[in-house]
Amino acid sequence: MTDRTISVDYLARVEGEGALKVRIHGWNVEEVELQIFEPPRFFEAFLRGRGYAEAPDITARICGICPVAYQMSSCHAMEQALGISVGGQLRELRRLLYCGEWIESHALHIYLLHAPDFLGYPDAIRLAKDHPLAVKKGLKLKKAGNALMSLLGGREIHPINVRVGGFYRVPSKEELEAFRPELESALELAEETVHFAHTFKFPDVKEDYDFVALRPPNEYPLNEGNVASSTGLEVPASRFEEEFQEVHVRHSNALHCVRKGGGSYLVGPLARYALNYDRLPPRATSLAREVDLTPPVRNPFRSVLVRAVEIVFACEEALRIIDQYDPPESAWVPAPAPSGPTEGCAVTEAPRGILYHRYRLDEKGLIADAKIVAPTSQNQKRIEDDVRHLVTRSVHLDDESLGYACERAIRNHDPCISCATHFLDLEVVRD
Amino acid sequence: MHEQAMFRDLLRKVTEVAQAEGAPHITRIRLWVGALSHLTAAHLQADWAPMTQGTVAEGAGLEVTVSSDLNDPRAQGVVLMSLDVGAREPAPPPGTPGA
């Protein structure tokens, strides 16, 4: 057979990533079951028997949108296990890399997934027809986040420059300064995004959330801080499993995470904002005031505004880091060989909320056991609660309208299946 | 990993076309990525090799064209435009050095 070209012209479909089942009896909502695919559980098994230094690169593959979060949580956990601490400029560079991920992830969600909901469009394509400038600005913002990830991570997807102890290579002062104009422009776009989102009409909803986020002593959280809640919890990451518990549910591949002795809780922008508003830098604070975004924000639809304020924070923080940057002598802190079996854990703030990693290493530094608790599995029960409340309020709607309303309620929390919620398999059963 | 569903669908289609054409091997695949797709060319390039391992597309070259047209009706999608089919290199006869 000789080589030949076959034209296909086939539009790929995304299916089977998420499903929602709602059972309604009369006017009562009896069952809400959100089914999602959760890859971290498979990775926990892949990691066993691998060297500790491989964890950042392996776990980065869990998500193409937030690989930095997986790298950061795995690095911090391994560093705790090995007894090393990463501070100074290396710590700042990690925050800078994380800023890139927040910018691209939040911009993607706001402009391509969430904004169409508020402006009455079925998707970003129809939105772009009537608001091309807004969508172009969103794409430019996302590109700036991706470029920052490439600059520090070596490439924008699944970065390859992150290692336990720091980086393989650190940028020069000139490299970071050369990026400053793009970041300044991104900051302006981020401010416009806050004003853009402020024009949206928000349904009048208030949920009684138990917010959970990191709370560091004197900065908006990214890599460090105690795990805090709006109900008064404040514990180090090492006590995460004493306070939170993963449970199997029949209807989902993902484990549900709940407060021990309690119920659902919410992680992500609303939680971070509620617990760390006083740690926002000046421009983000001033914009939040301008759009009356007083914490805590308990209306899940207004999460789009909080995400926009968080992009402003990420741009401001990135500029601060670049301005004070003084390249470190070494790109990483060397890790000693383990003197025996050891264990470490860490929590960092993925764009969607806290991400917990725990590793047990044997005496050779091989991973004996891994546990990863992703933000989406922590929010899954809380999302079901939101949907249950929404269906209770909207039970009079026909199935199509109800399905759309449910998709919107899920998208409010930017789950990892966000892109797939436009393709959610919805089943409404009315008895 | 969340791109898996899309990759799975693309590979299903690639396999289907290869079978219909009686082609044992795909040598090149051309994808078009819409301006509003959440996937980037870097995404696709990074995940392509591991995802195609053990499939008819293993080892195939990947060409990605990224559109900037916001008004294209497929702007949020990824399109399998075309593929090149061909025979694998014949296996060397037994006893050949290095076989």
Image: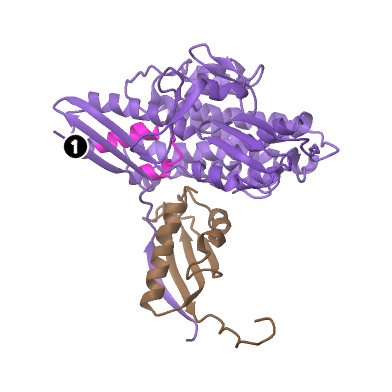
Q: Classify residue A401 as left or right of residue A360.
A: left
Pinpoint the chain carrying mark 1. A
Q: Is residue A174 visible to us here?
A: yes
Q: Is residue A152 visible?
A: no
Q: Which residue is mark 1?
A: A429
* Residue B74 vs residue A140, the one in the foreground: B74
Chief secondary structure of the magenta portion: helix
Q: Which chain is brown?
A: B
Crowding near the residue tagged with mark 1, few <14, some 14–19, many ≥20 C-alpha atoms within 10 Å: some
Which quadrant of the figure has residue A88? top right
Is residue A405 covered in magenta? Answer: yes
The location of residue A181, given as percent across then percent down, is 68, 39
Residue range of the region highlighted in magenta in the rendering:
A403-421
- The residue located at (35%, 25%) in the rendering is A202
Q: Position of residue A235 (x, y in %)?
A: 59, 17
- Chain identifier, purple in the render: A
Q: Could you tell me residue A84's position as x and y percent?
A: 77, 31
Q: How many marks?
A: 1
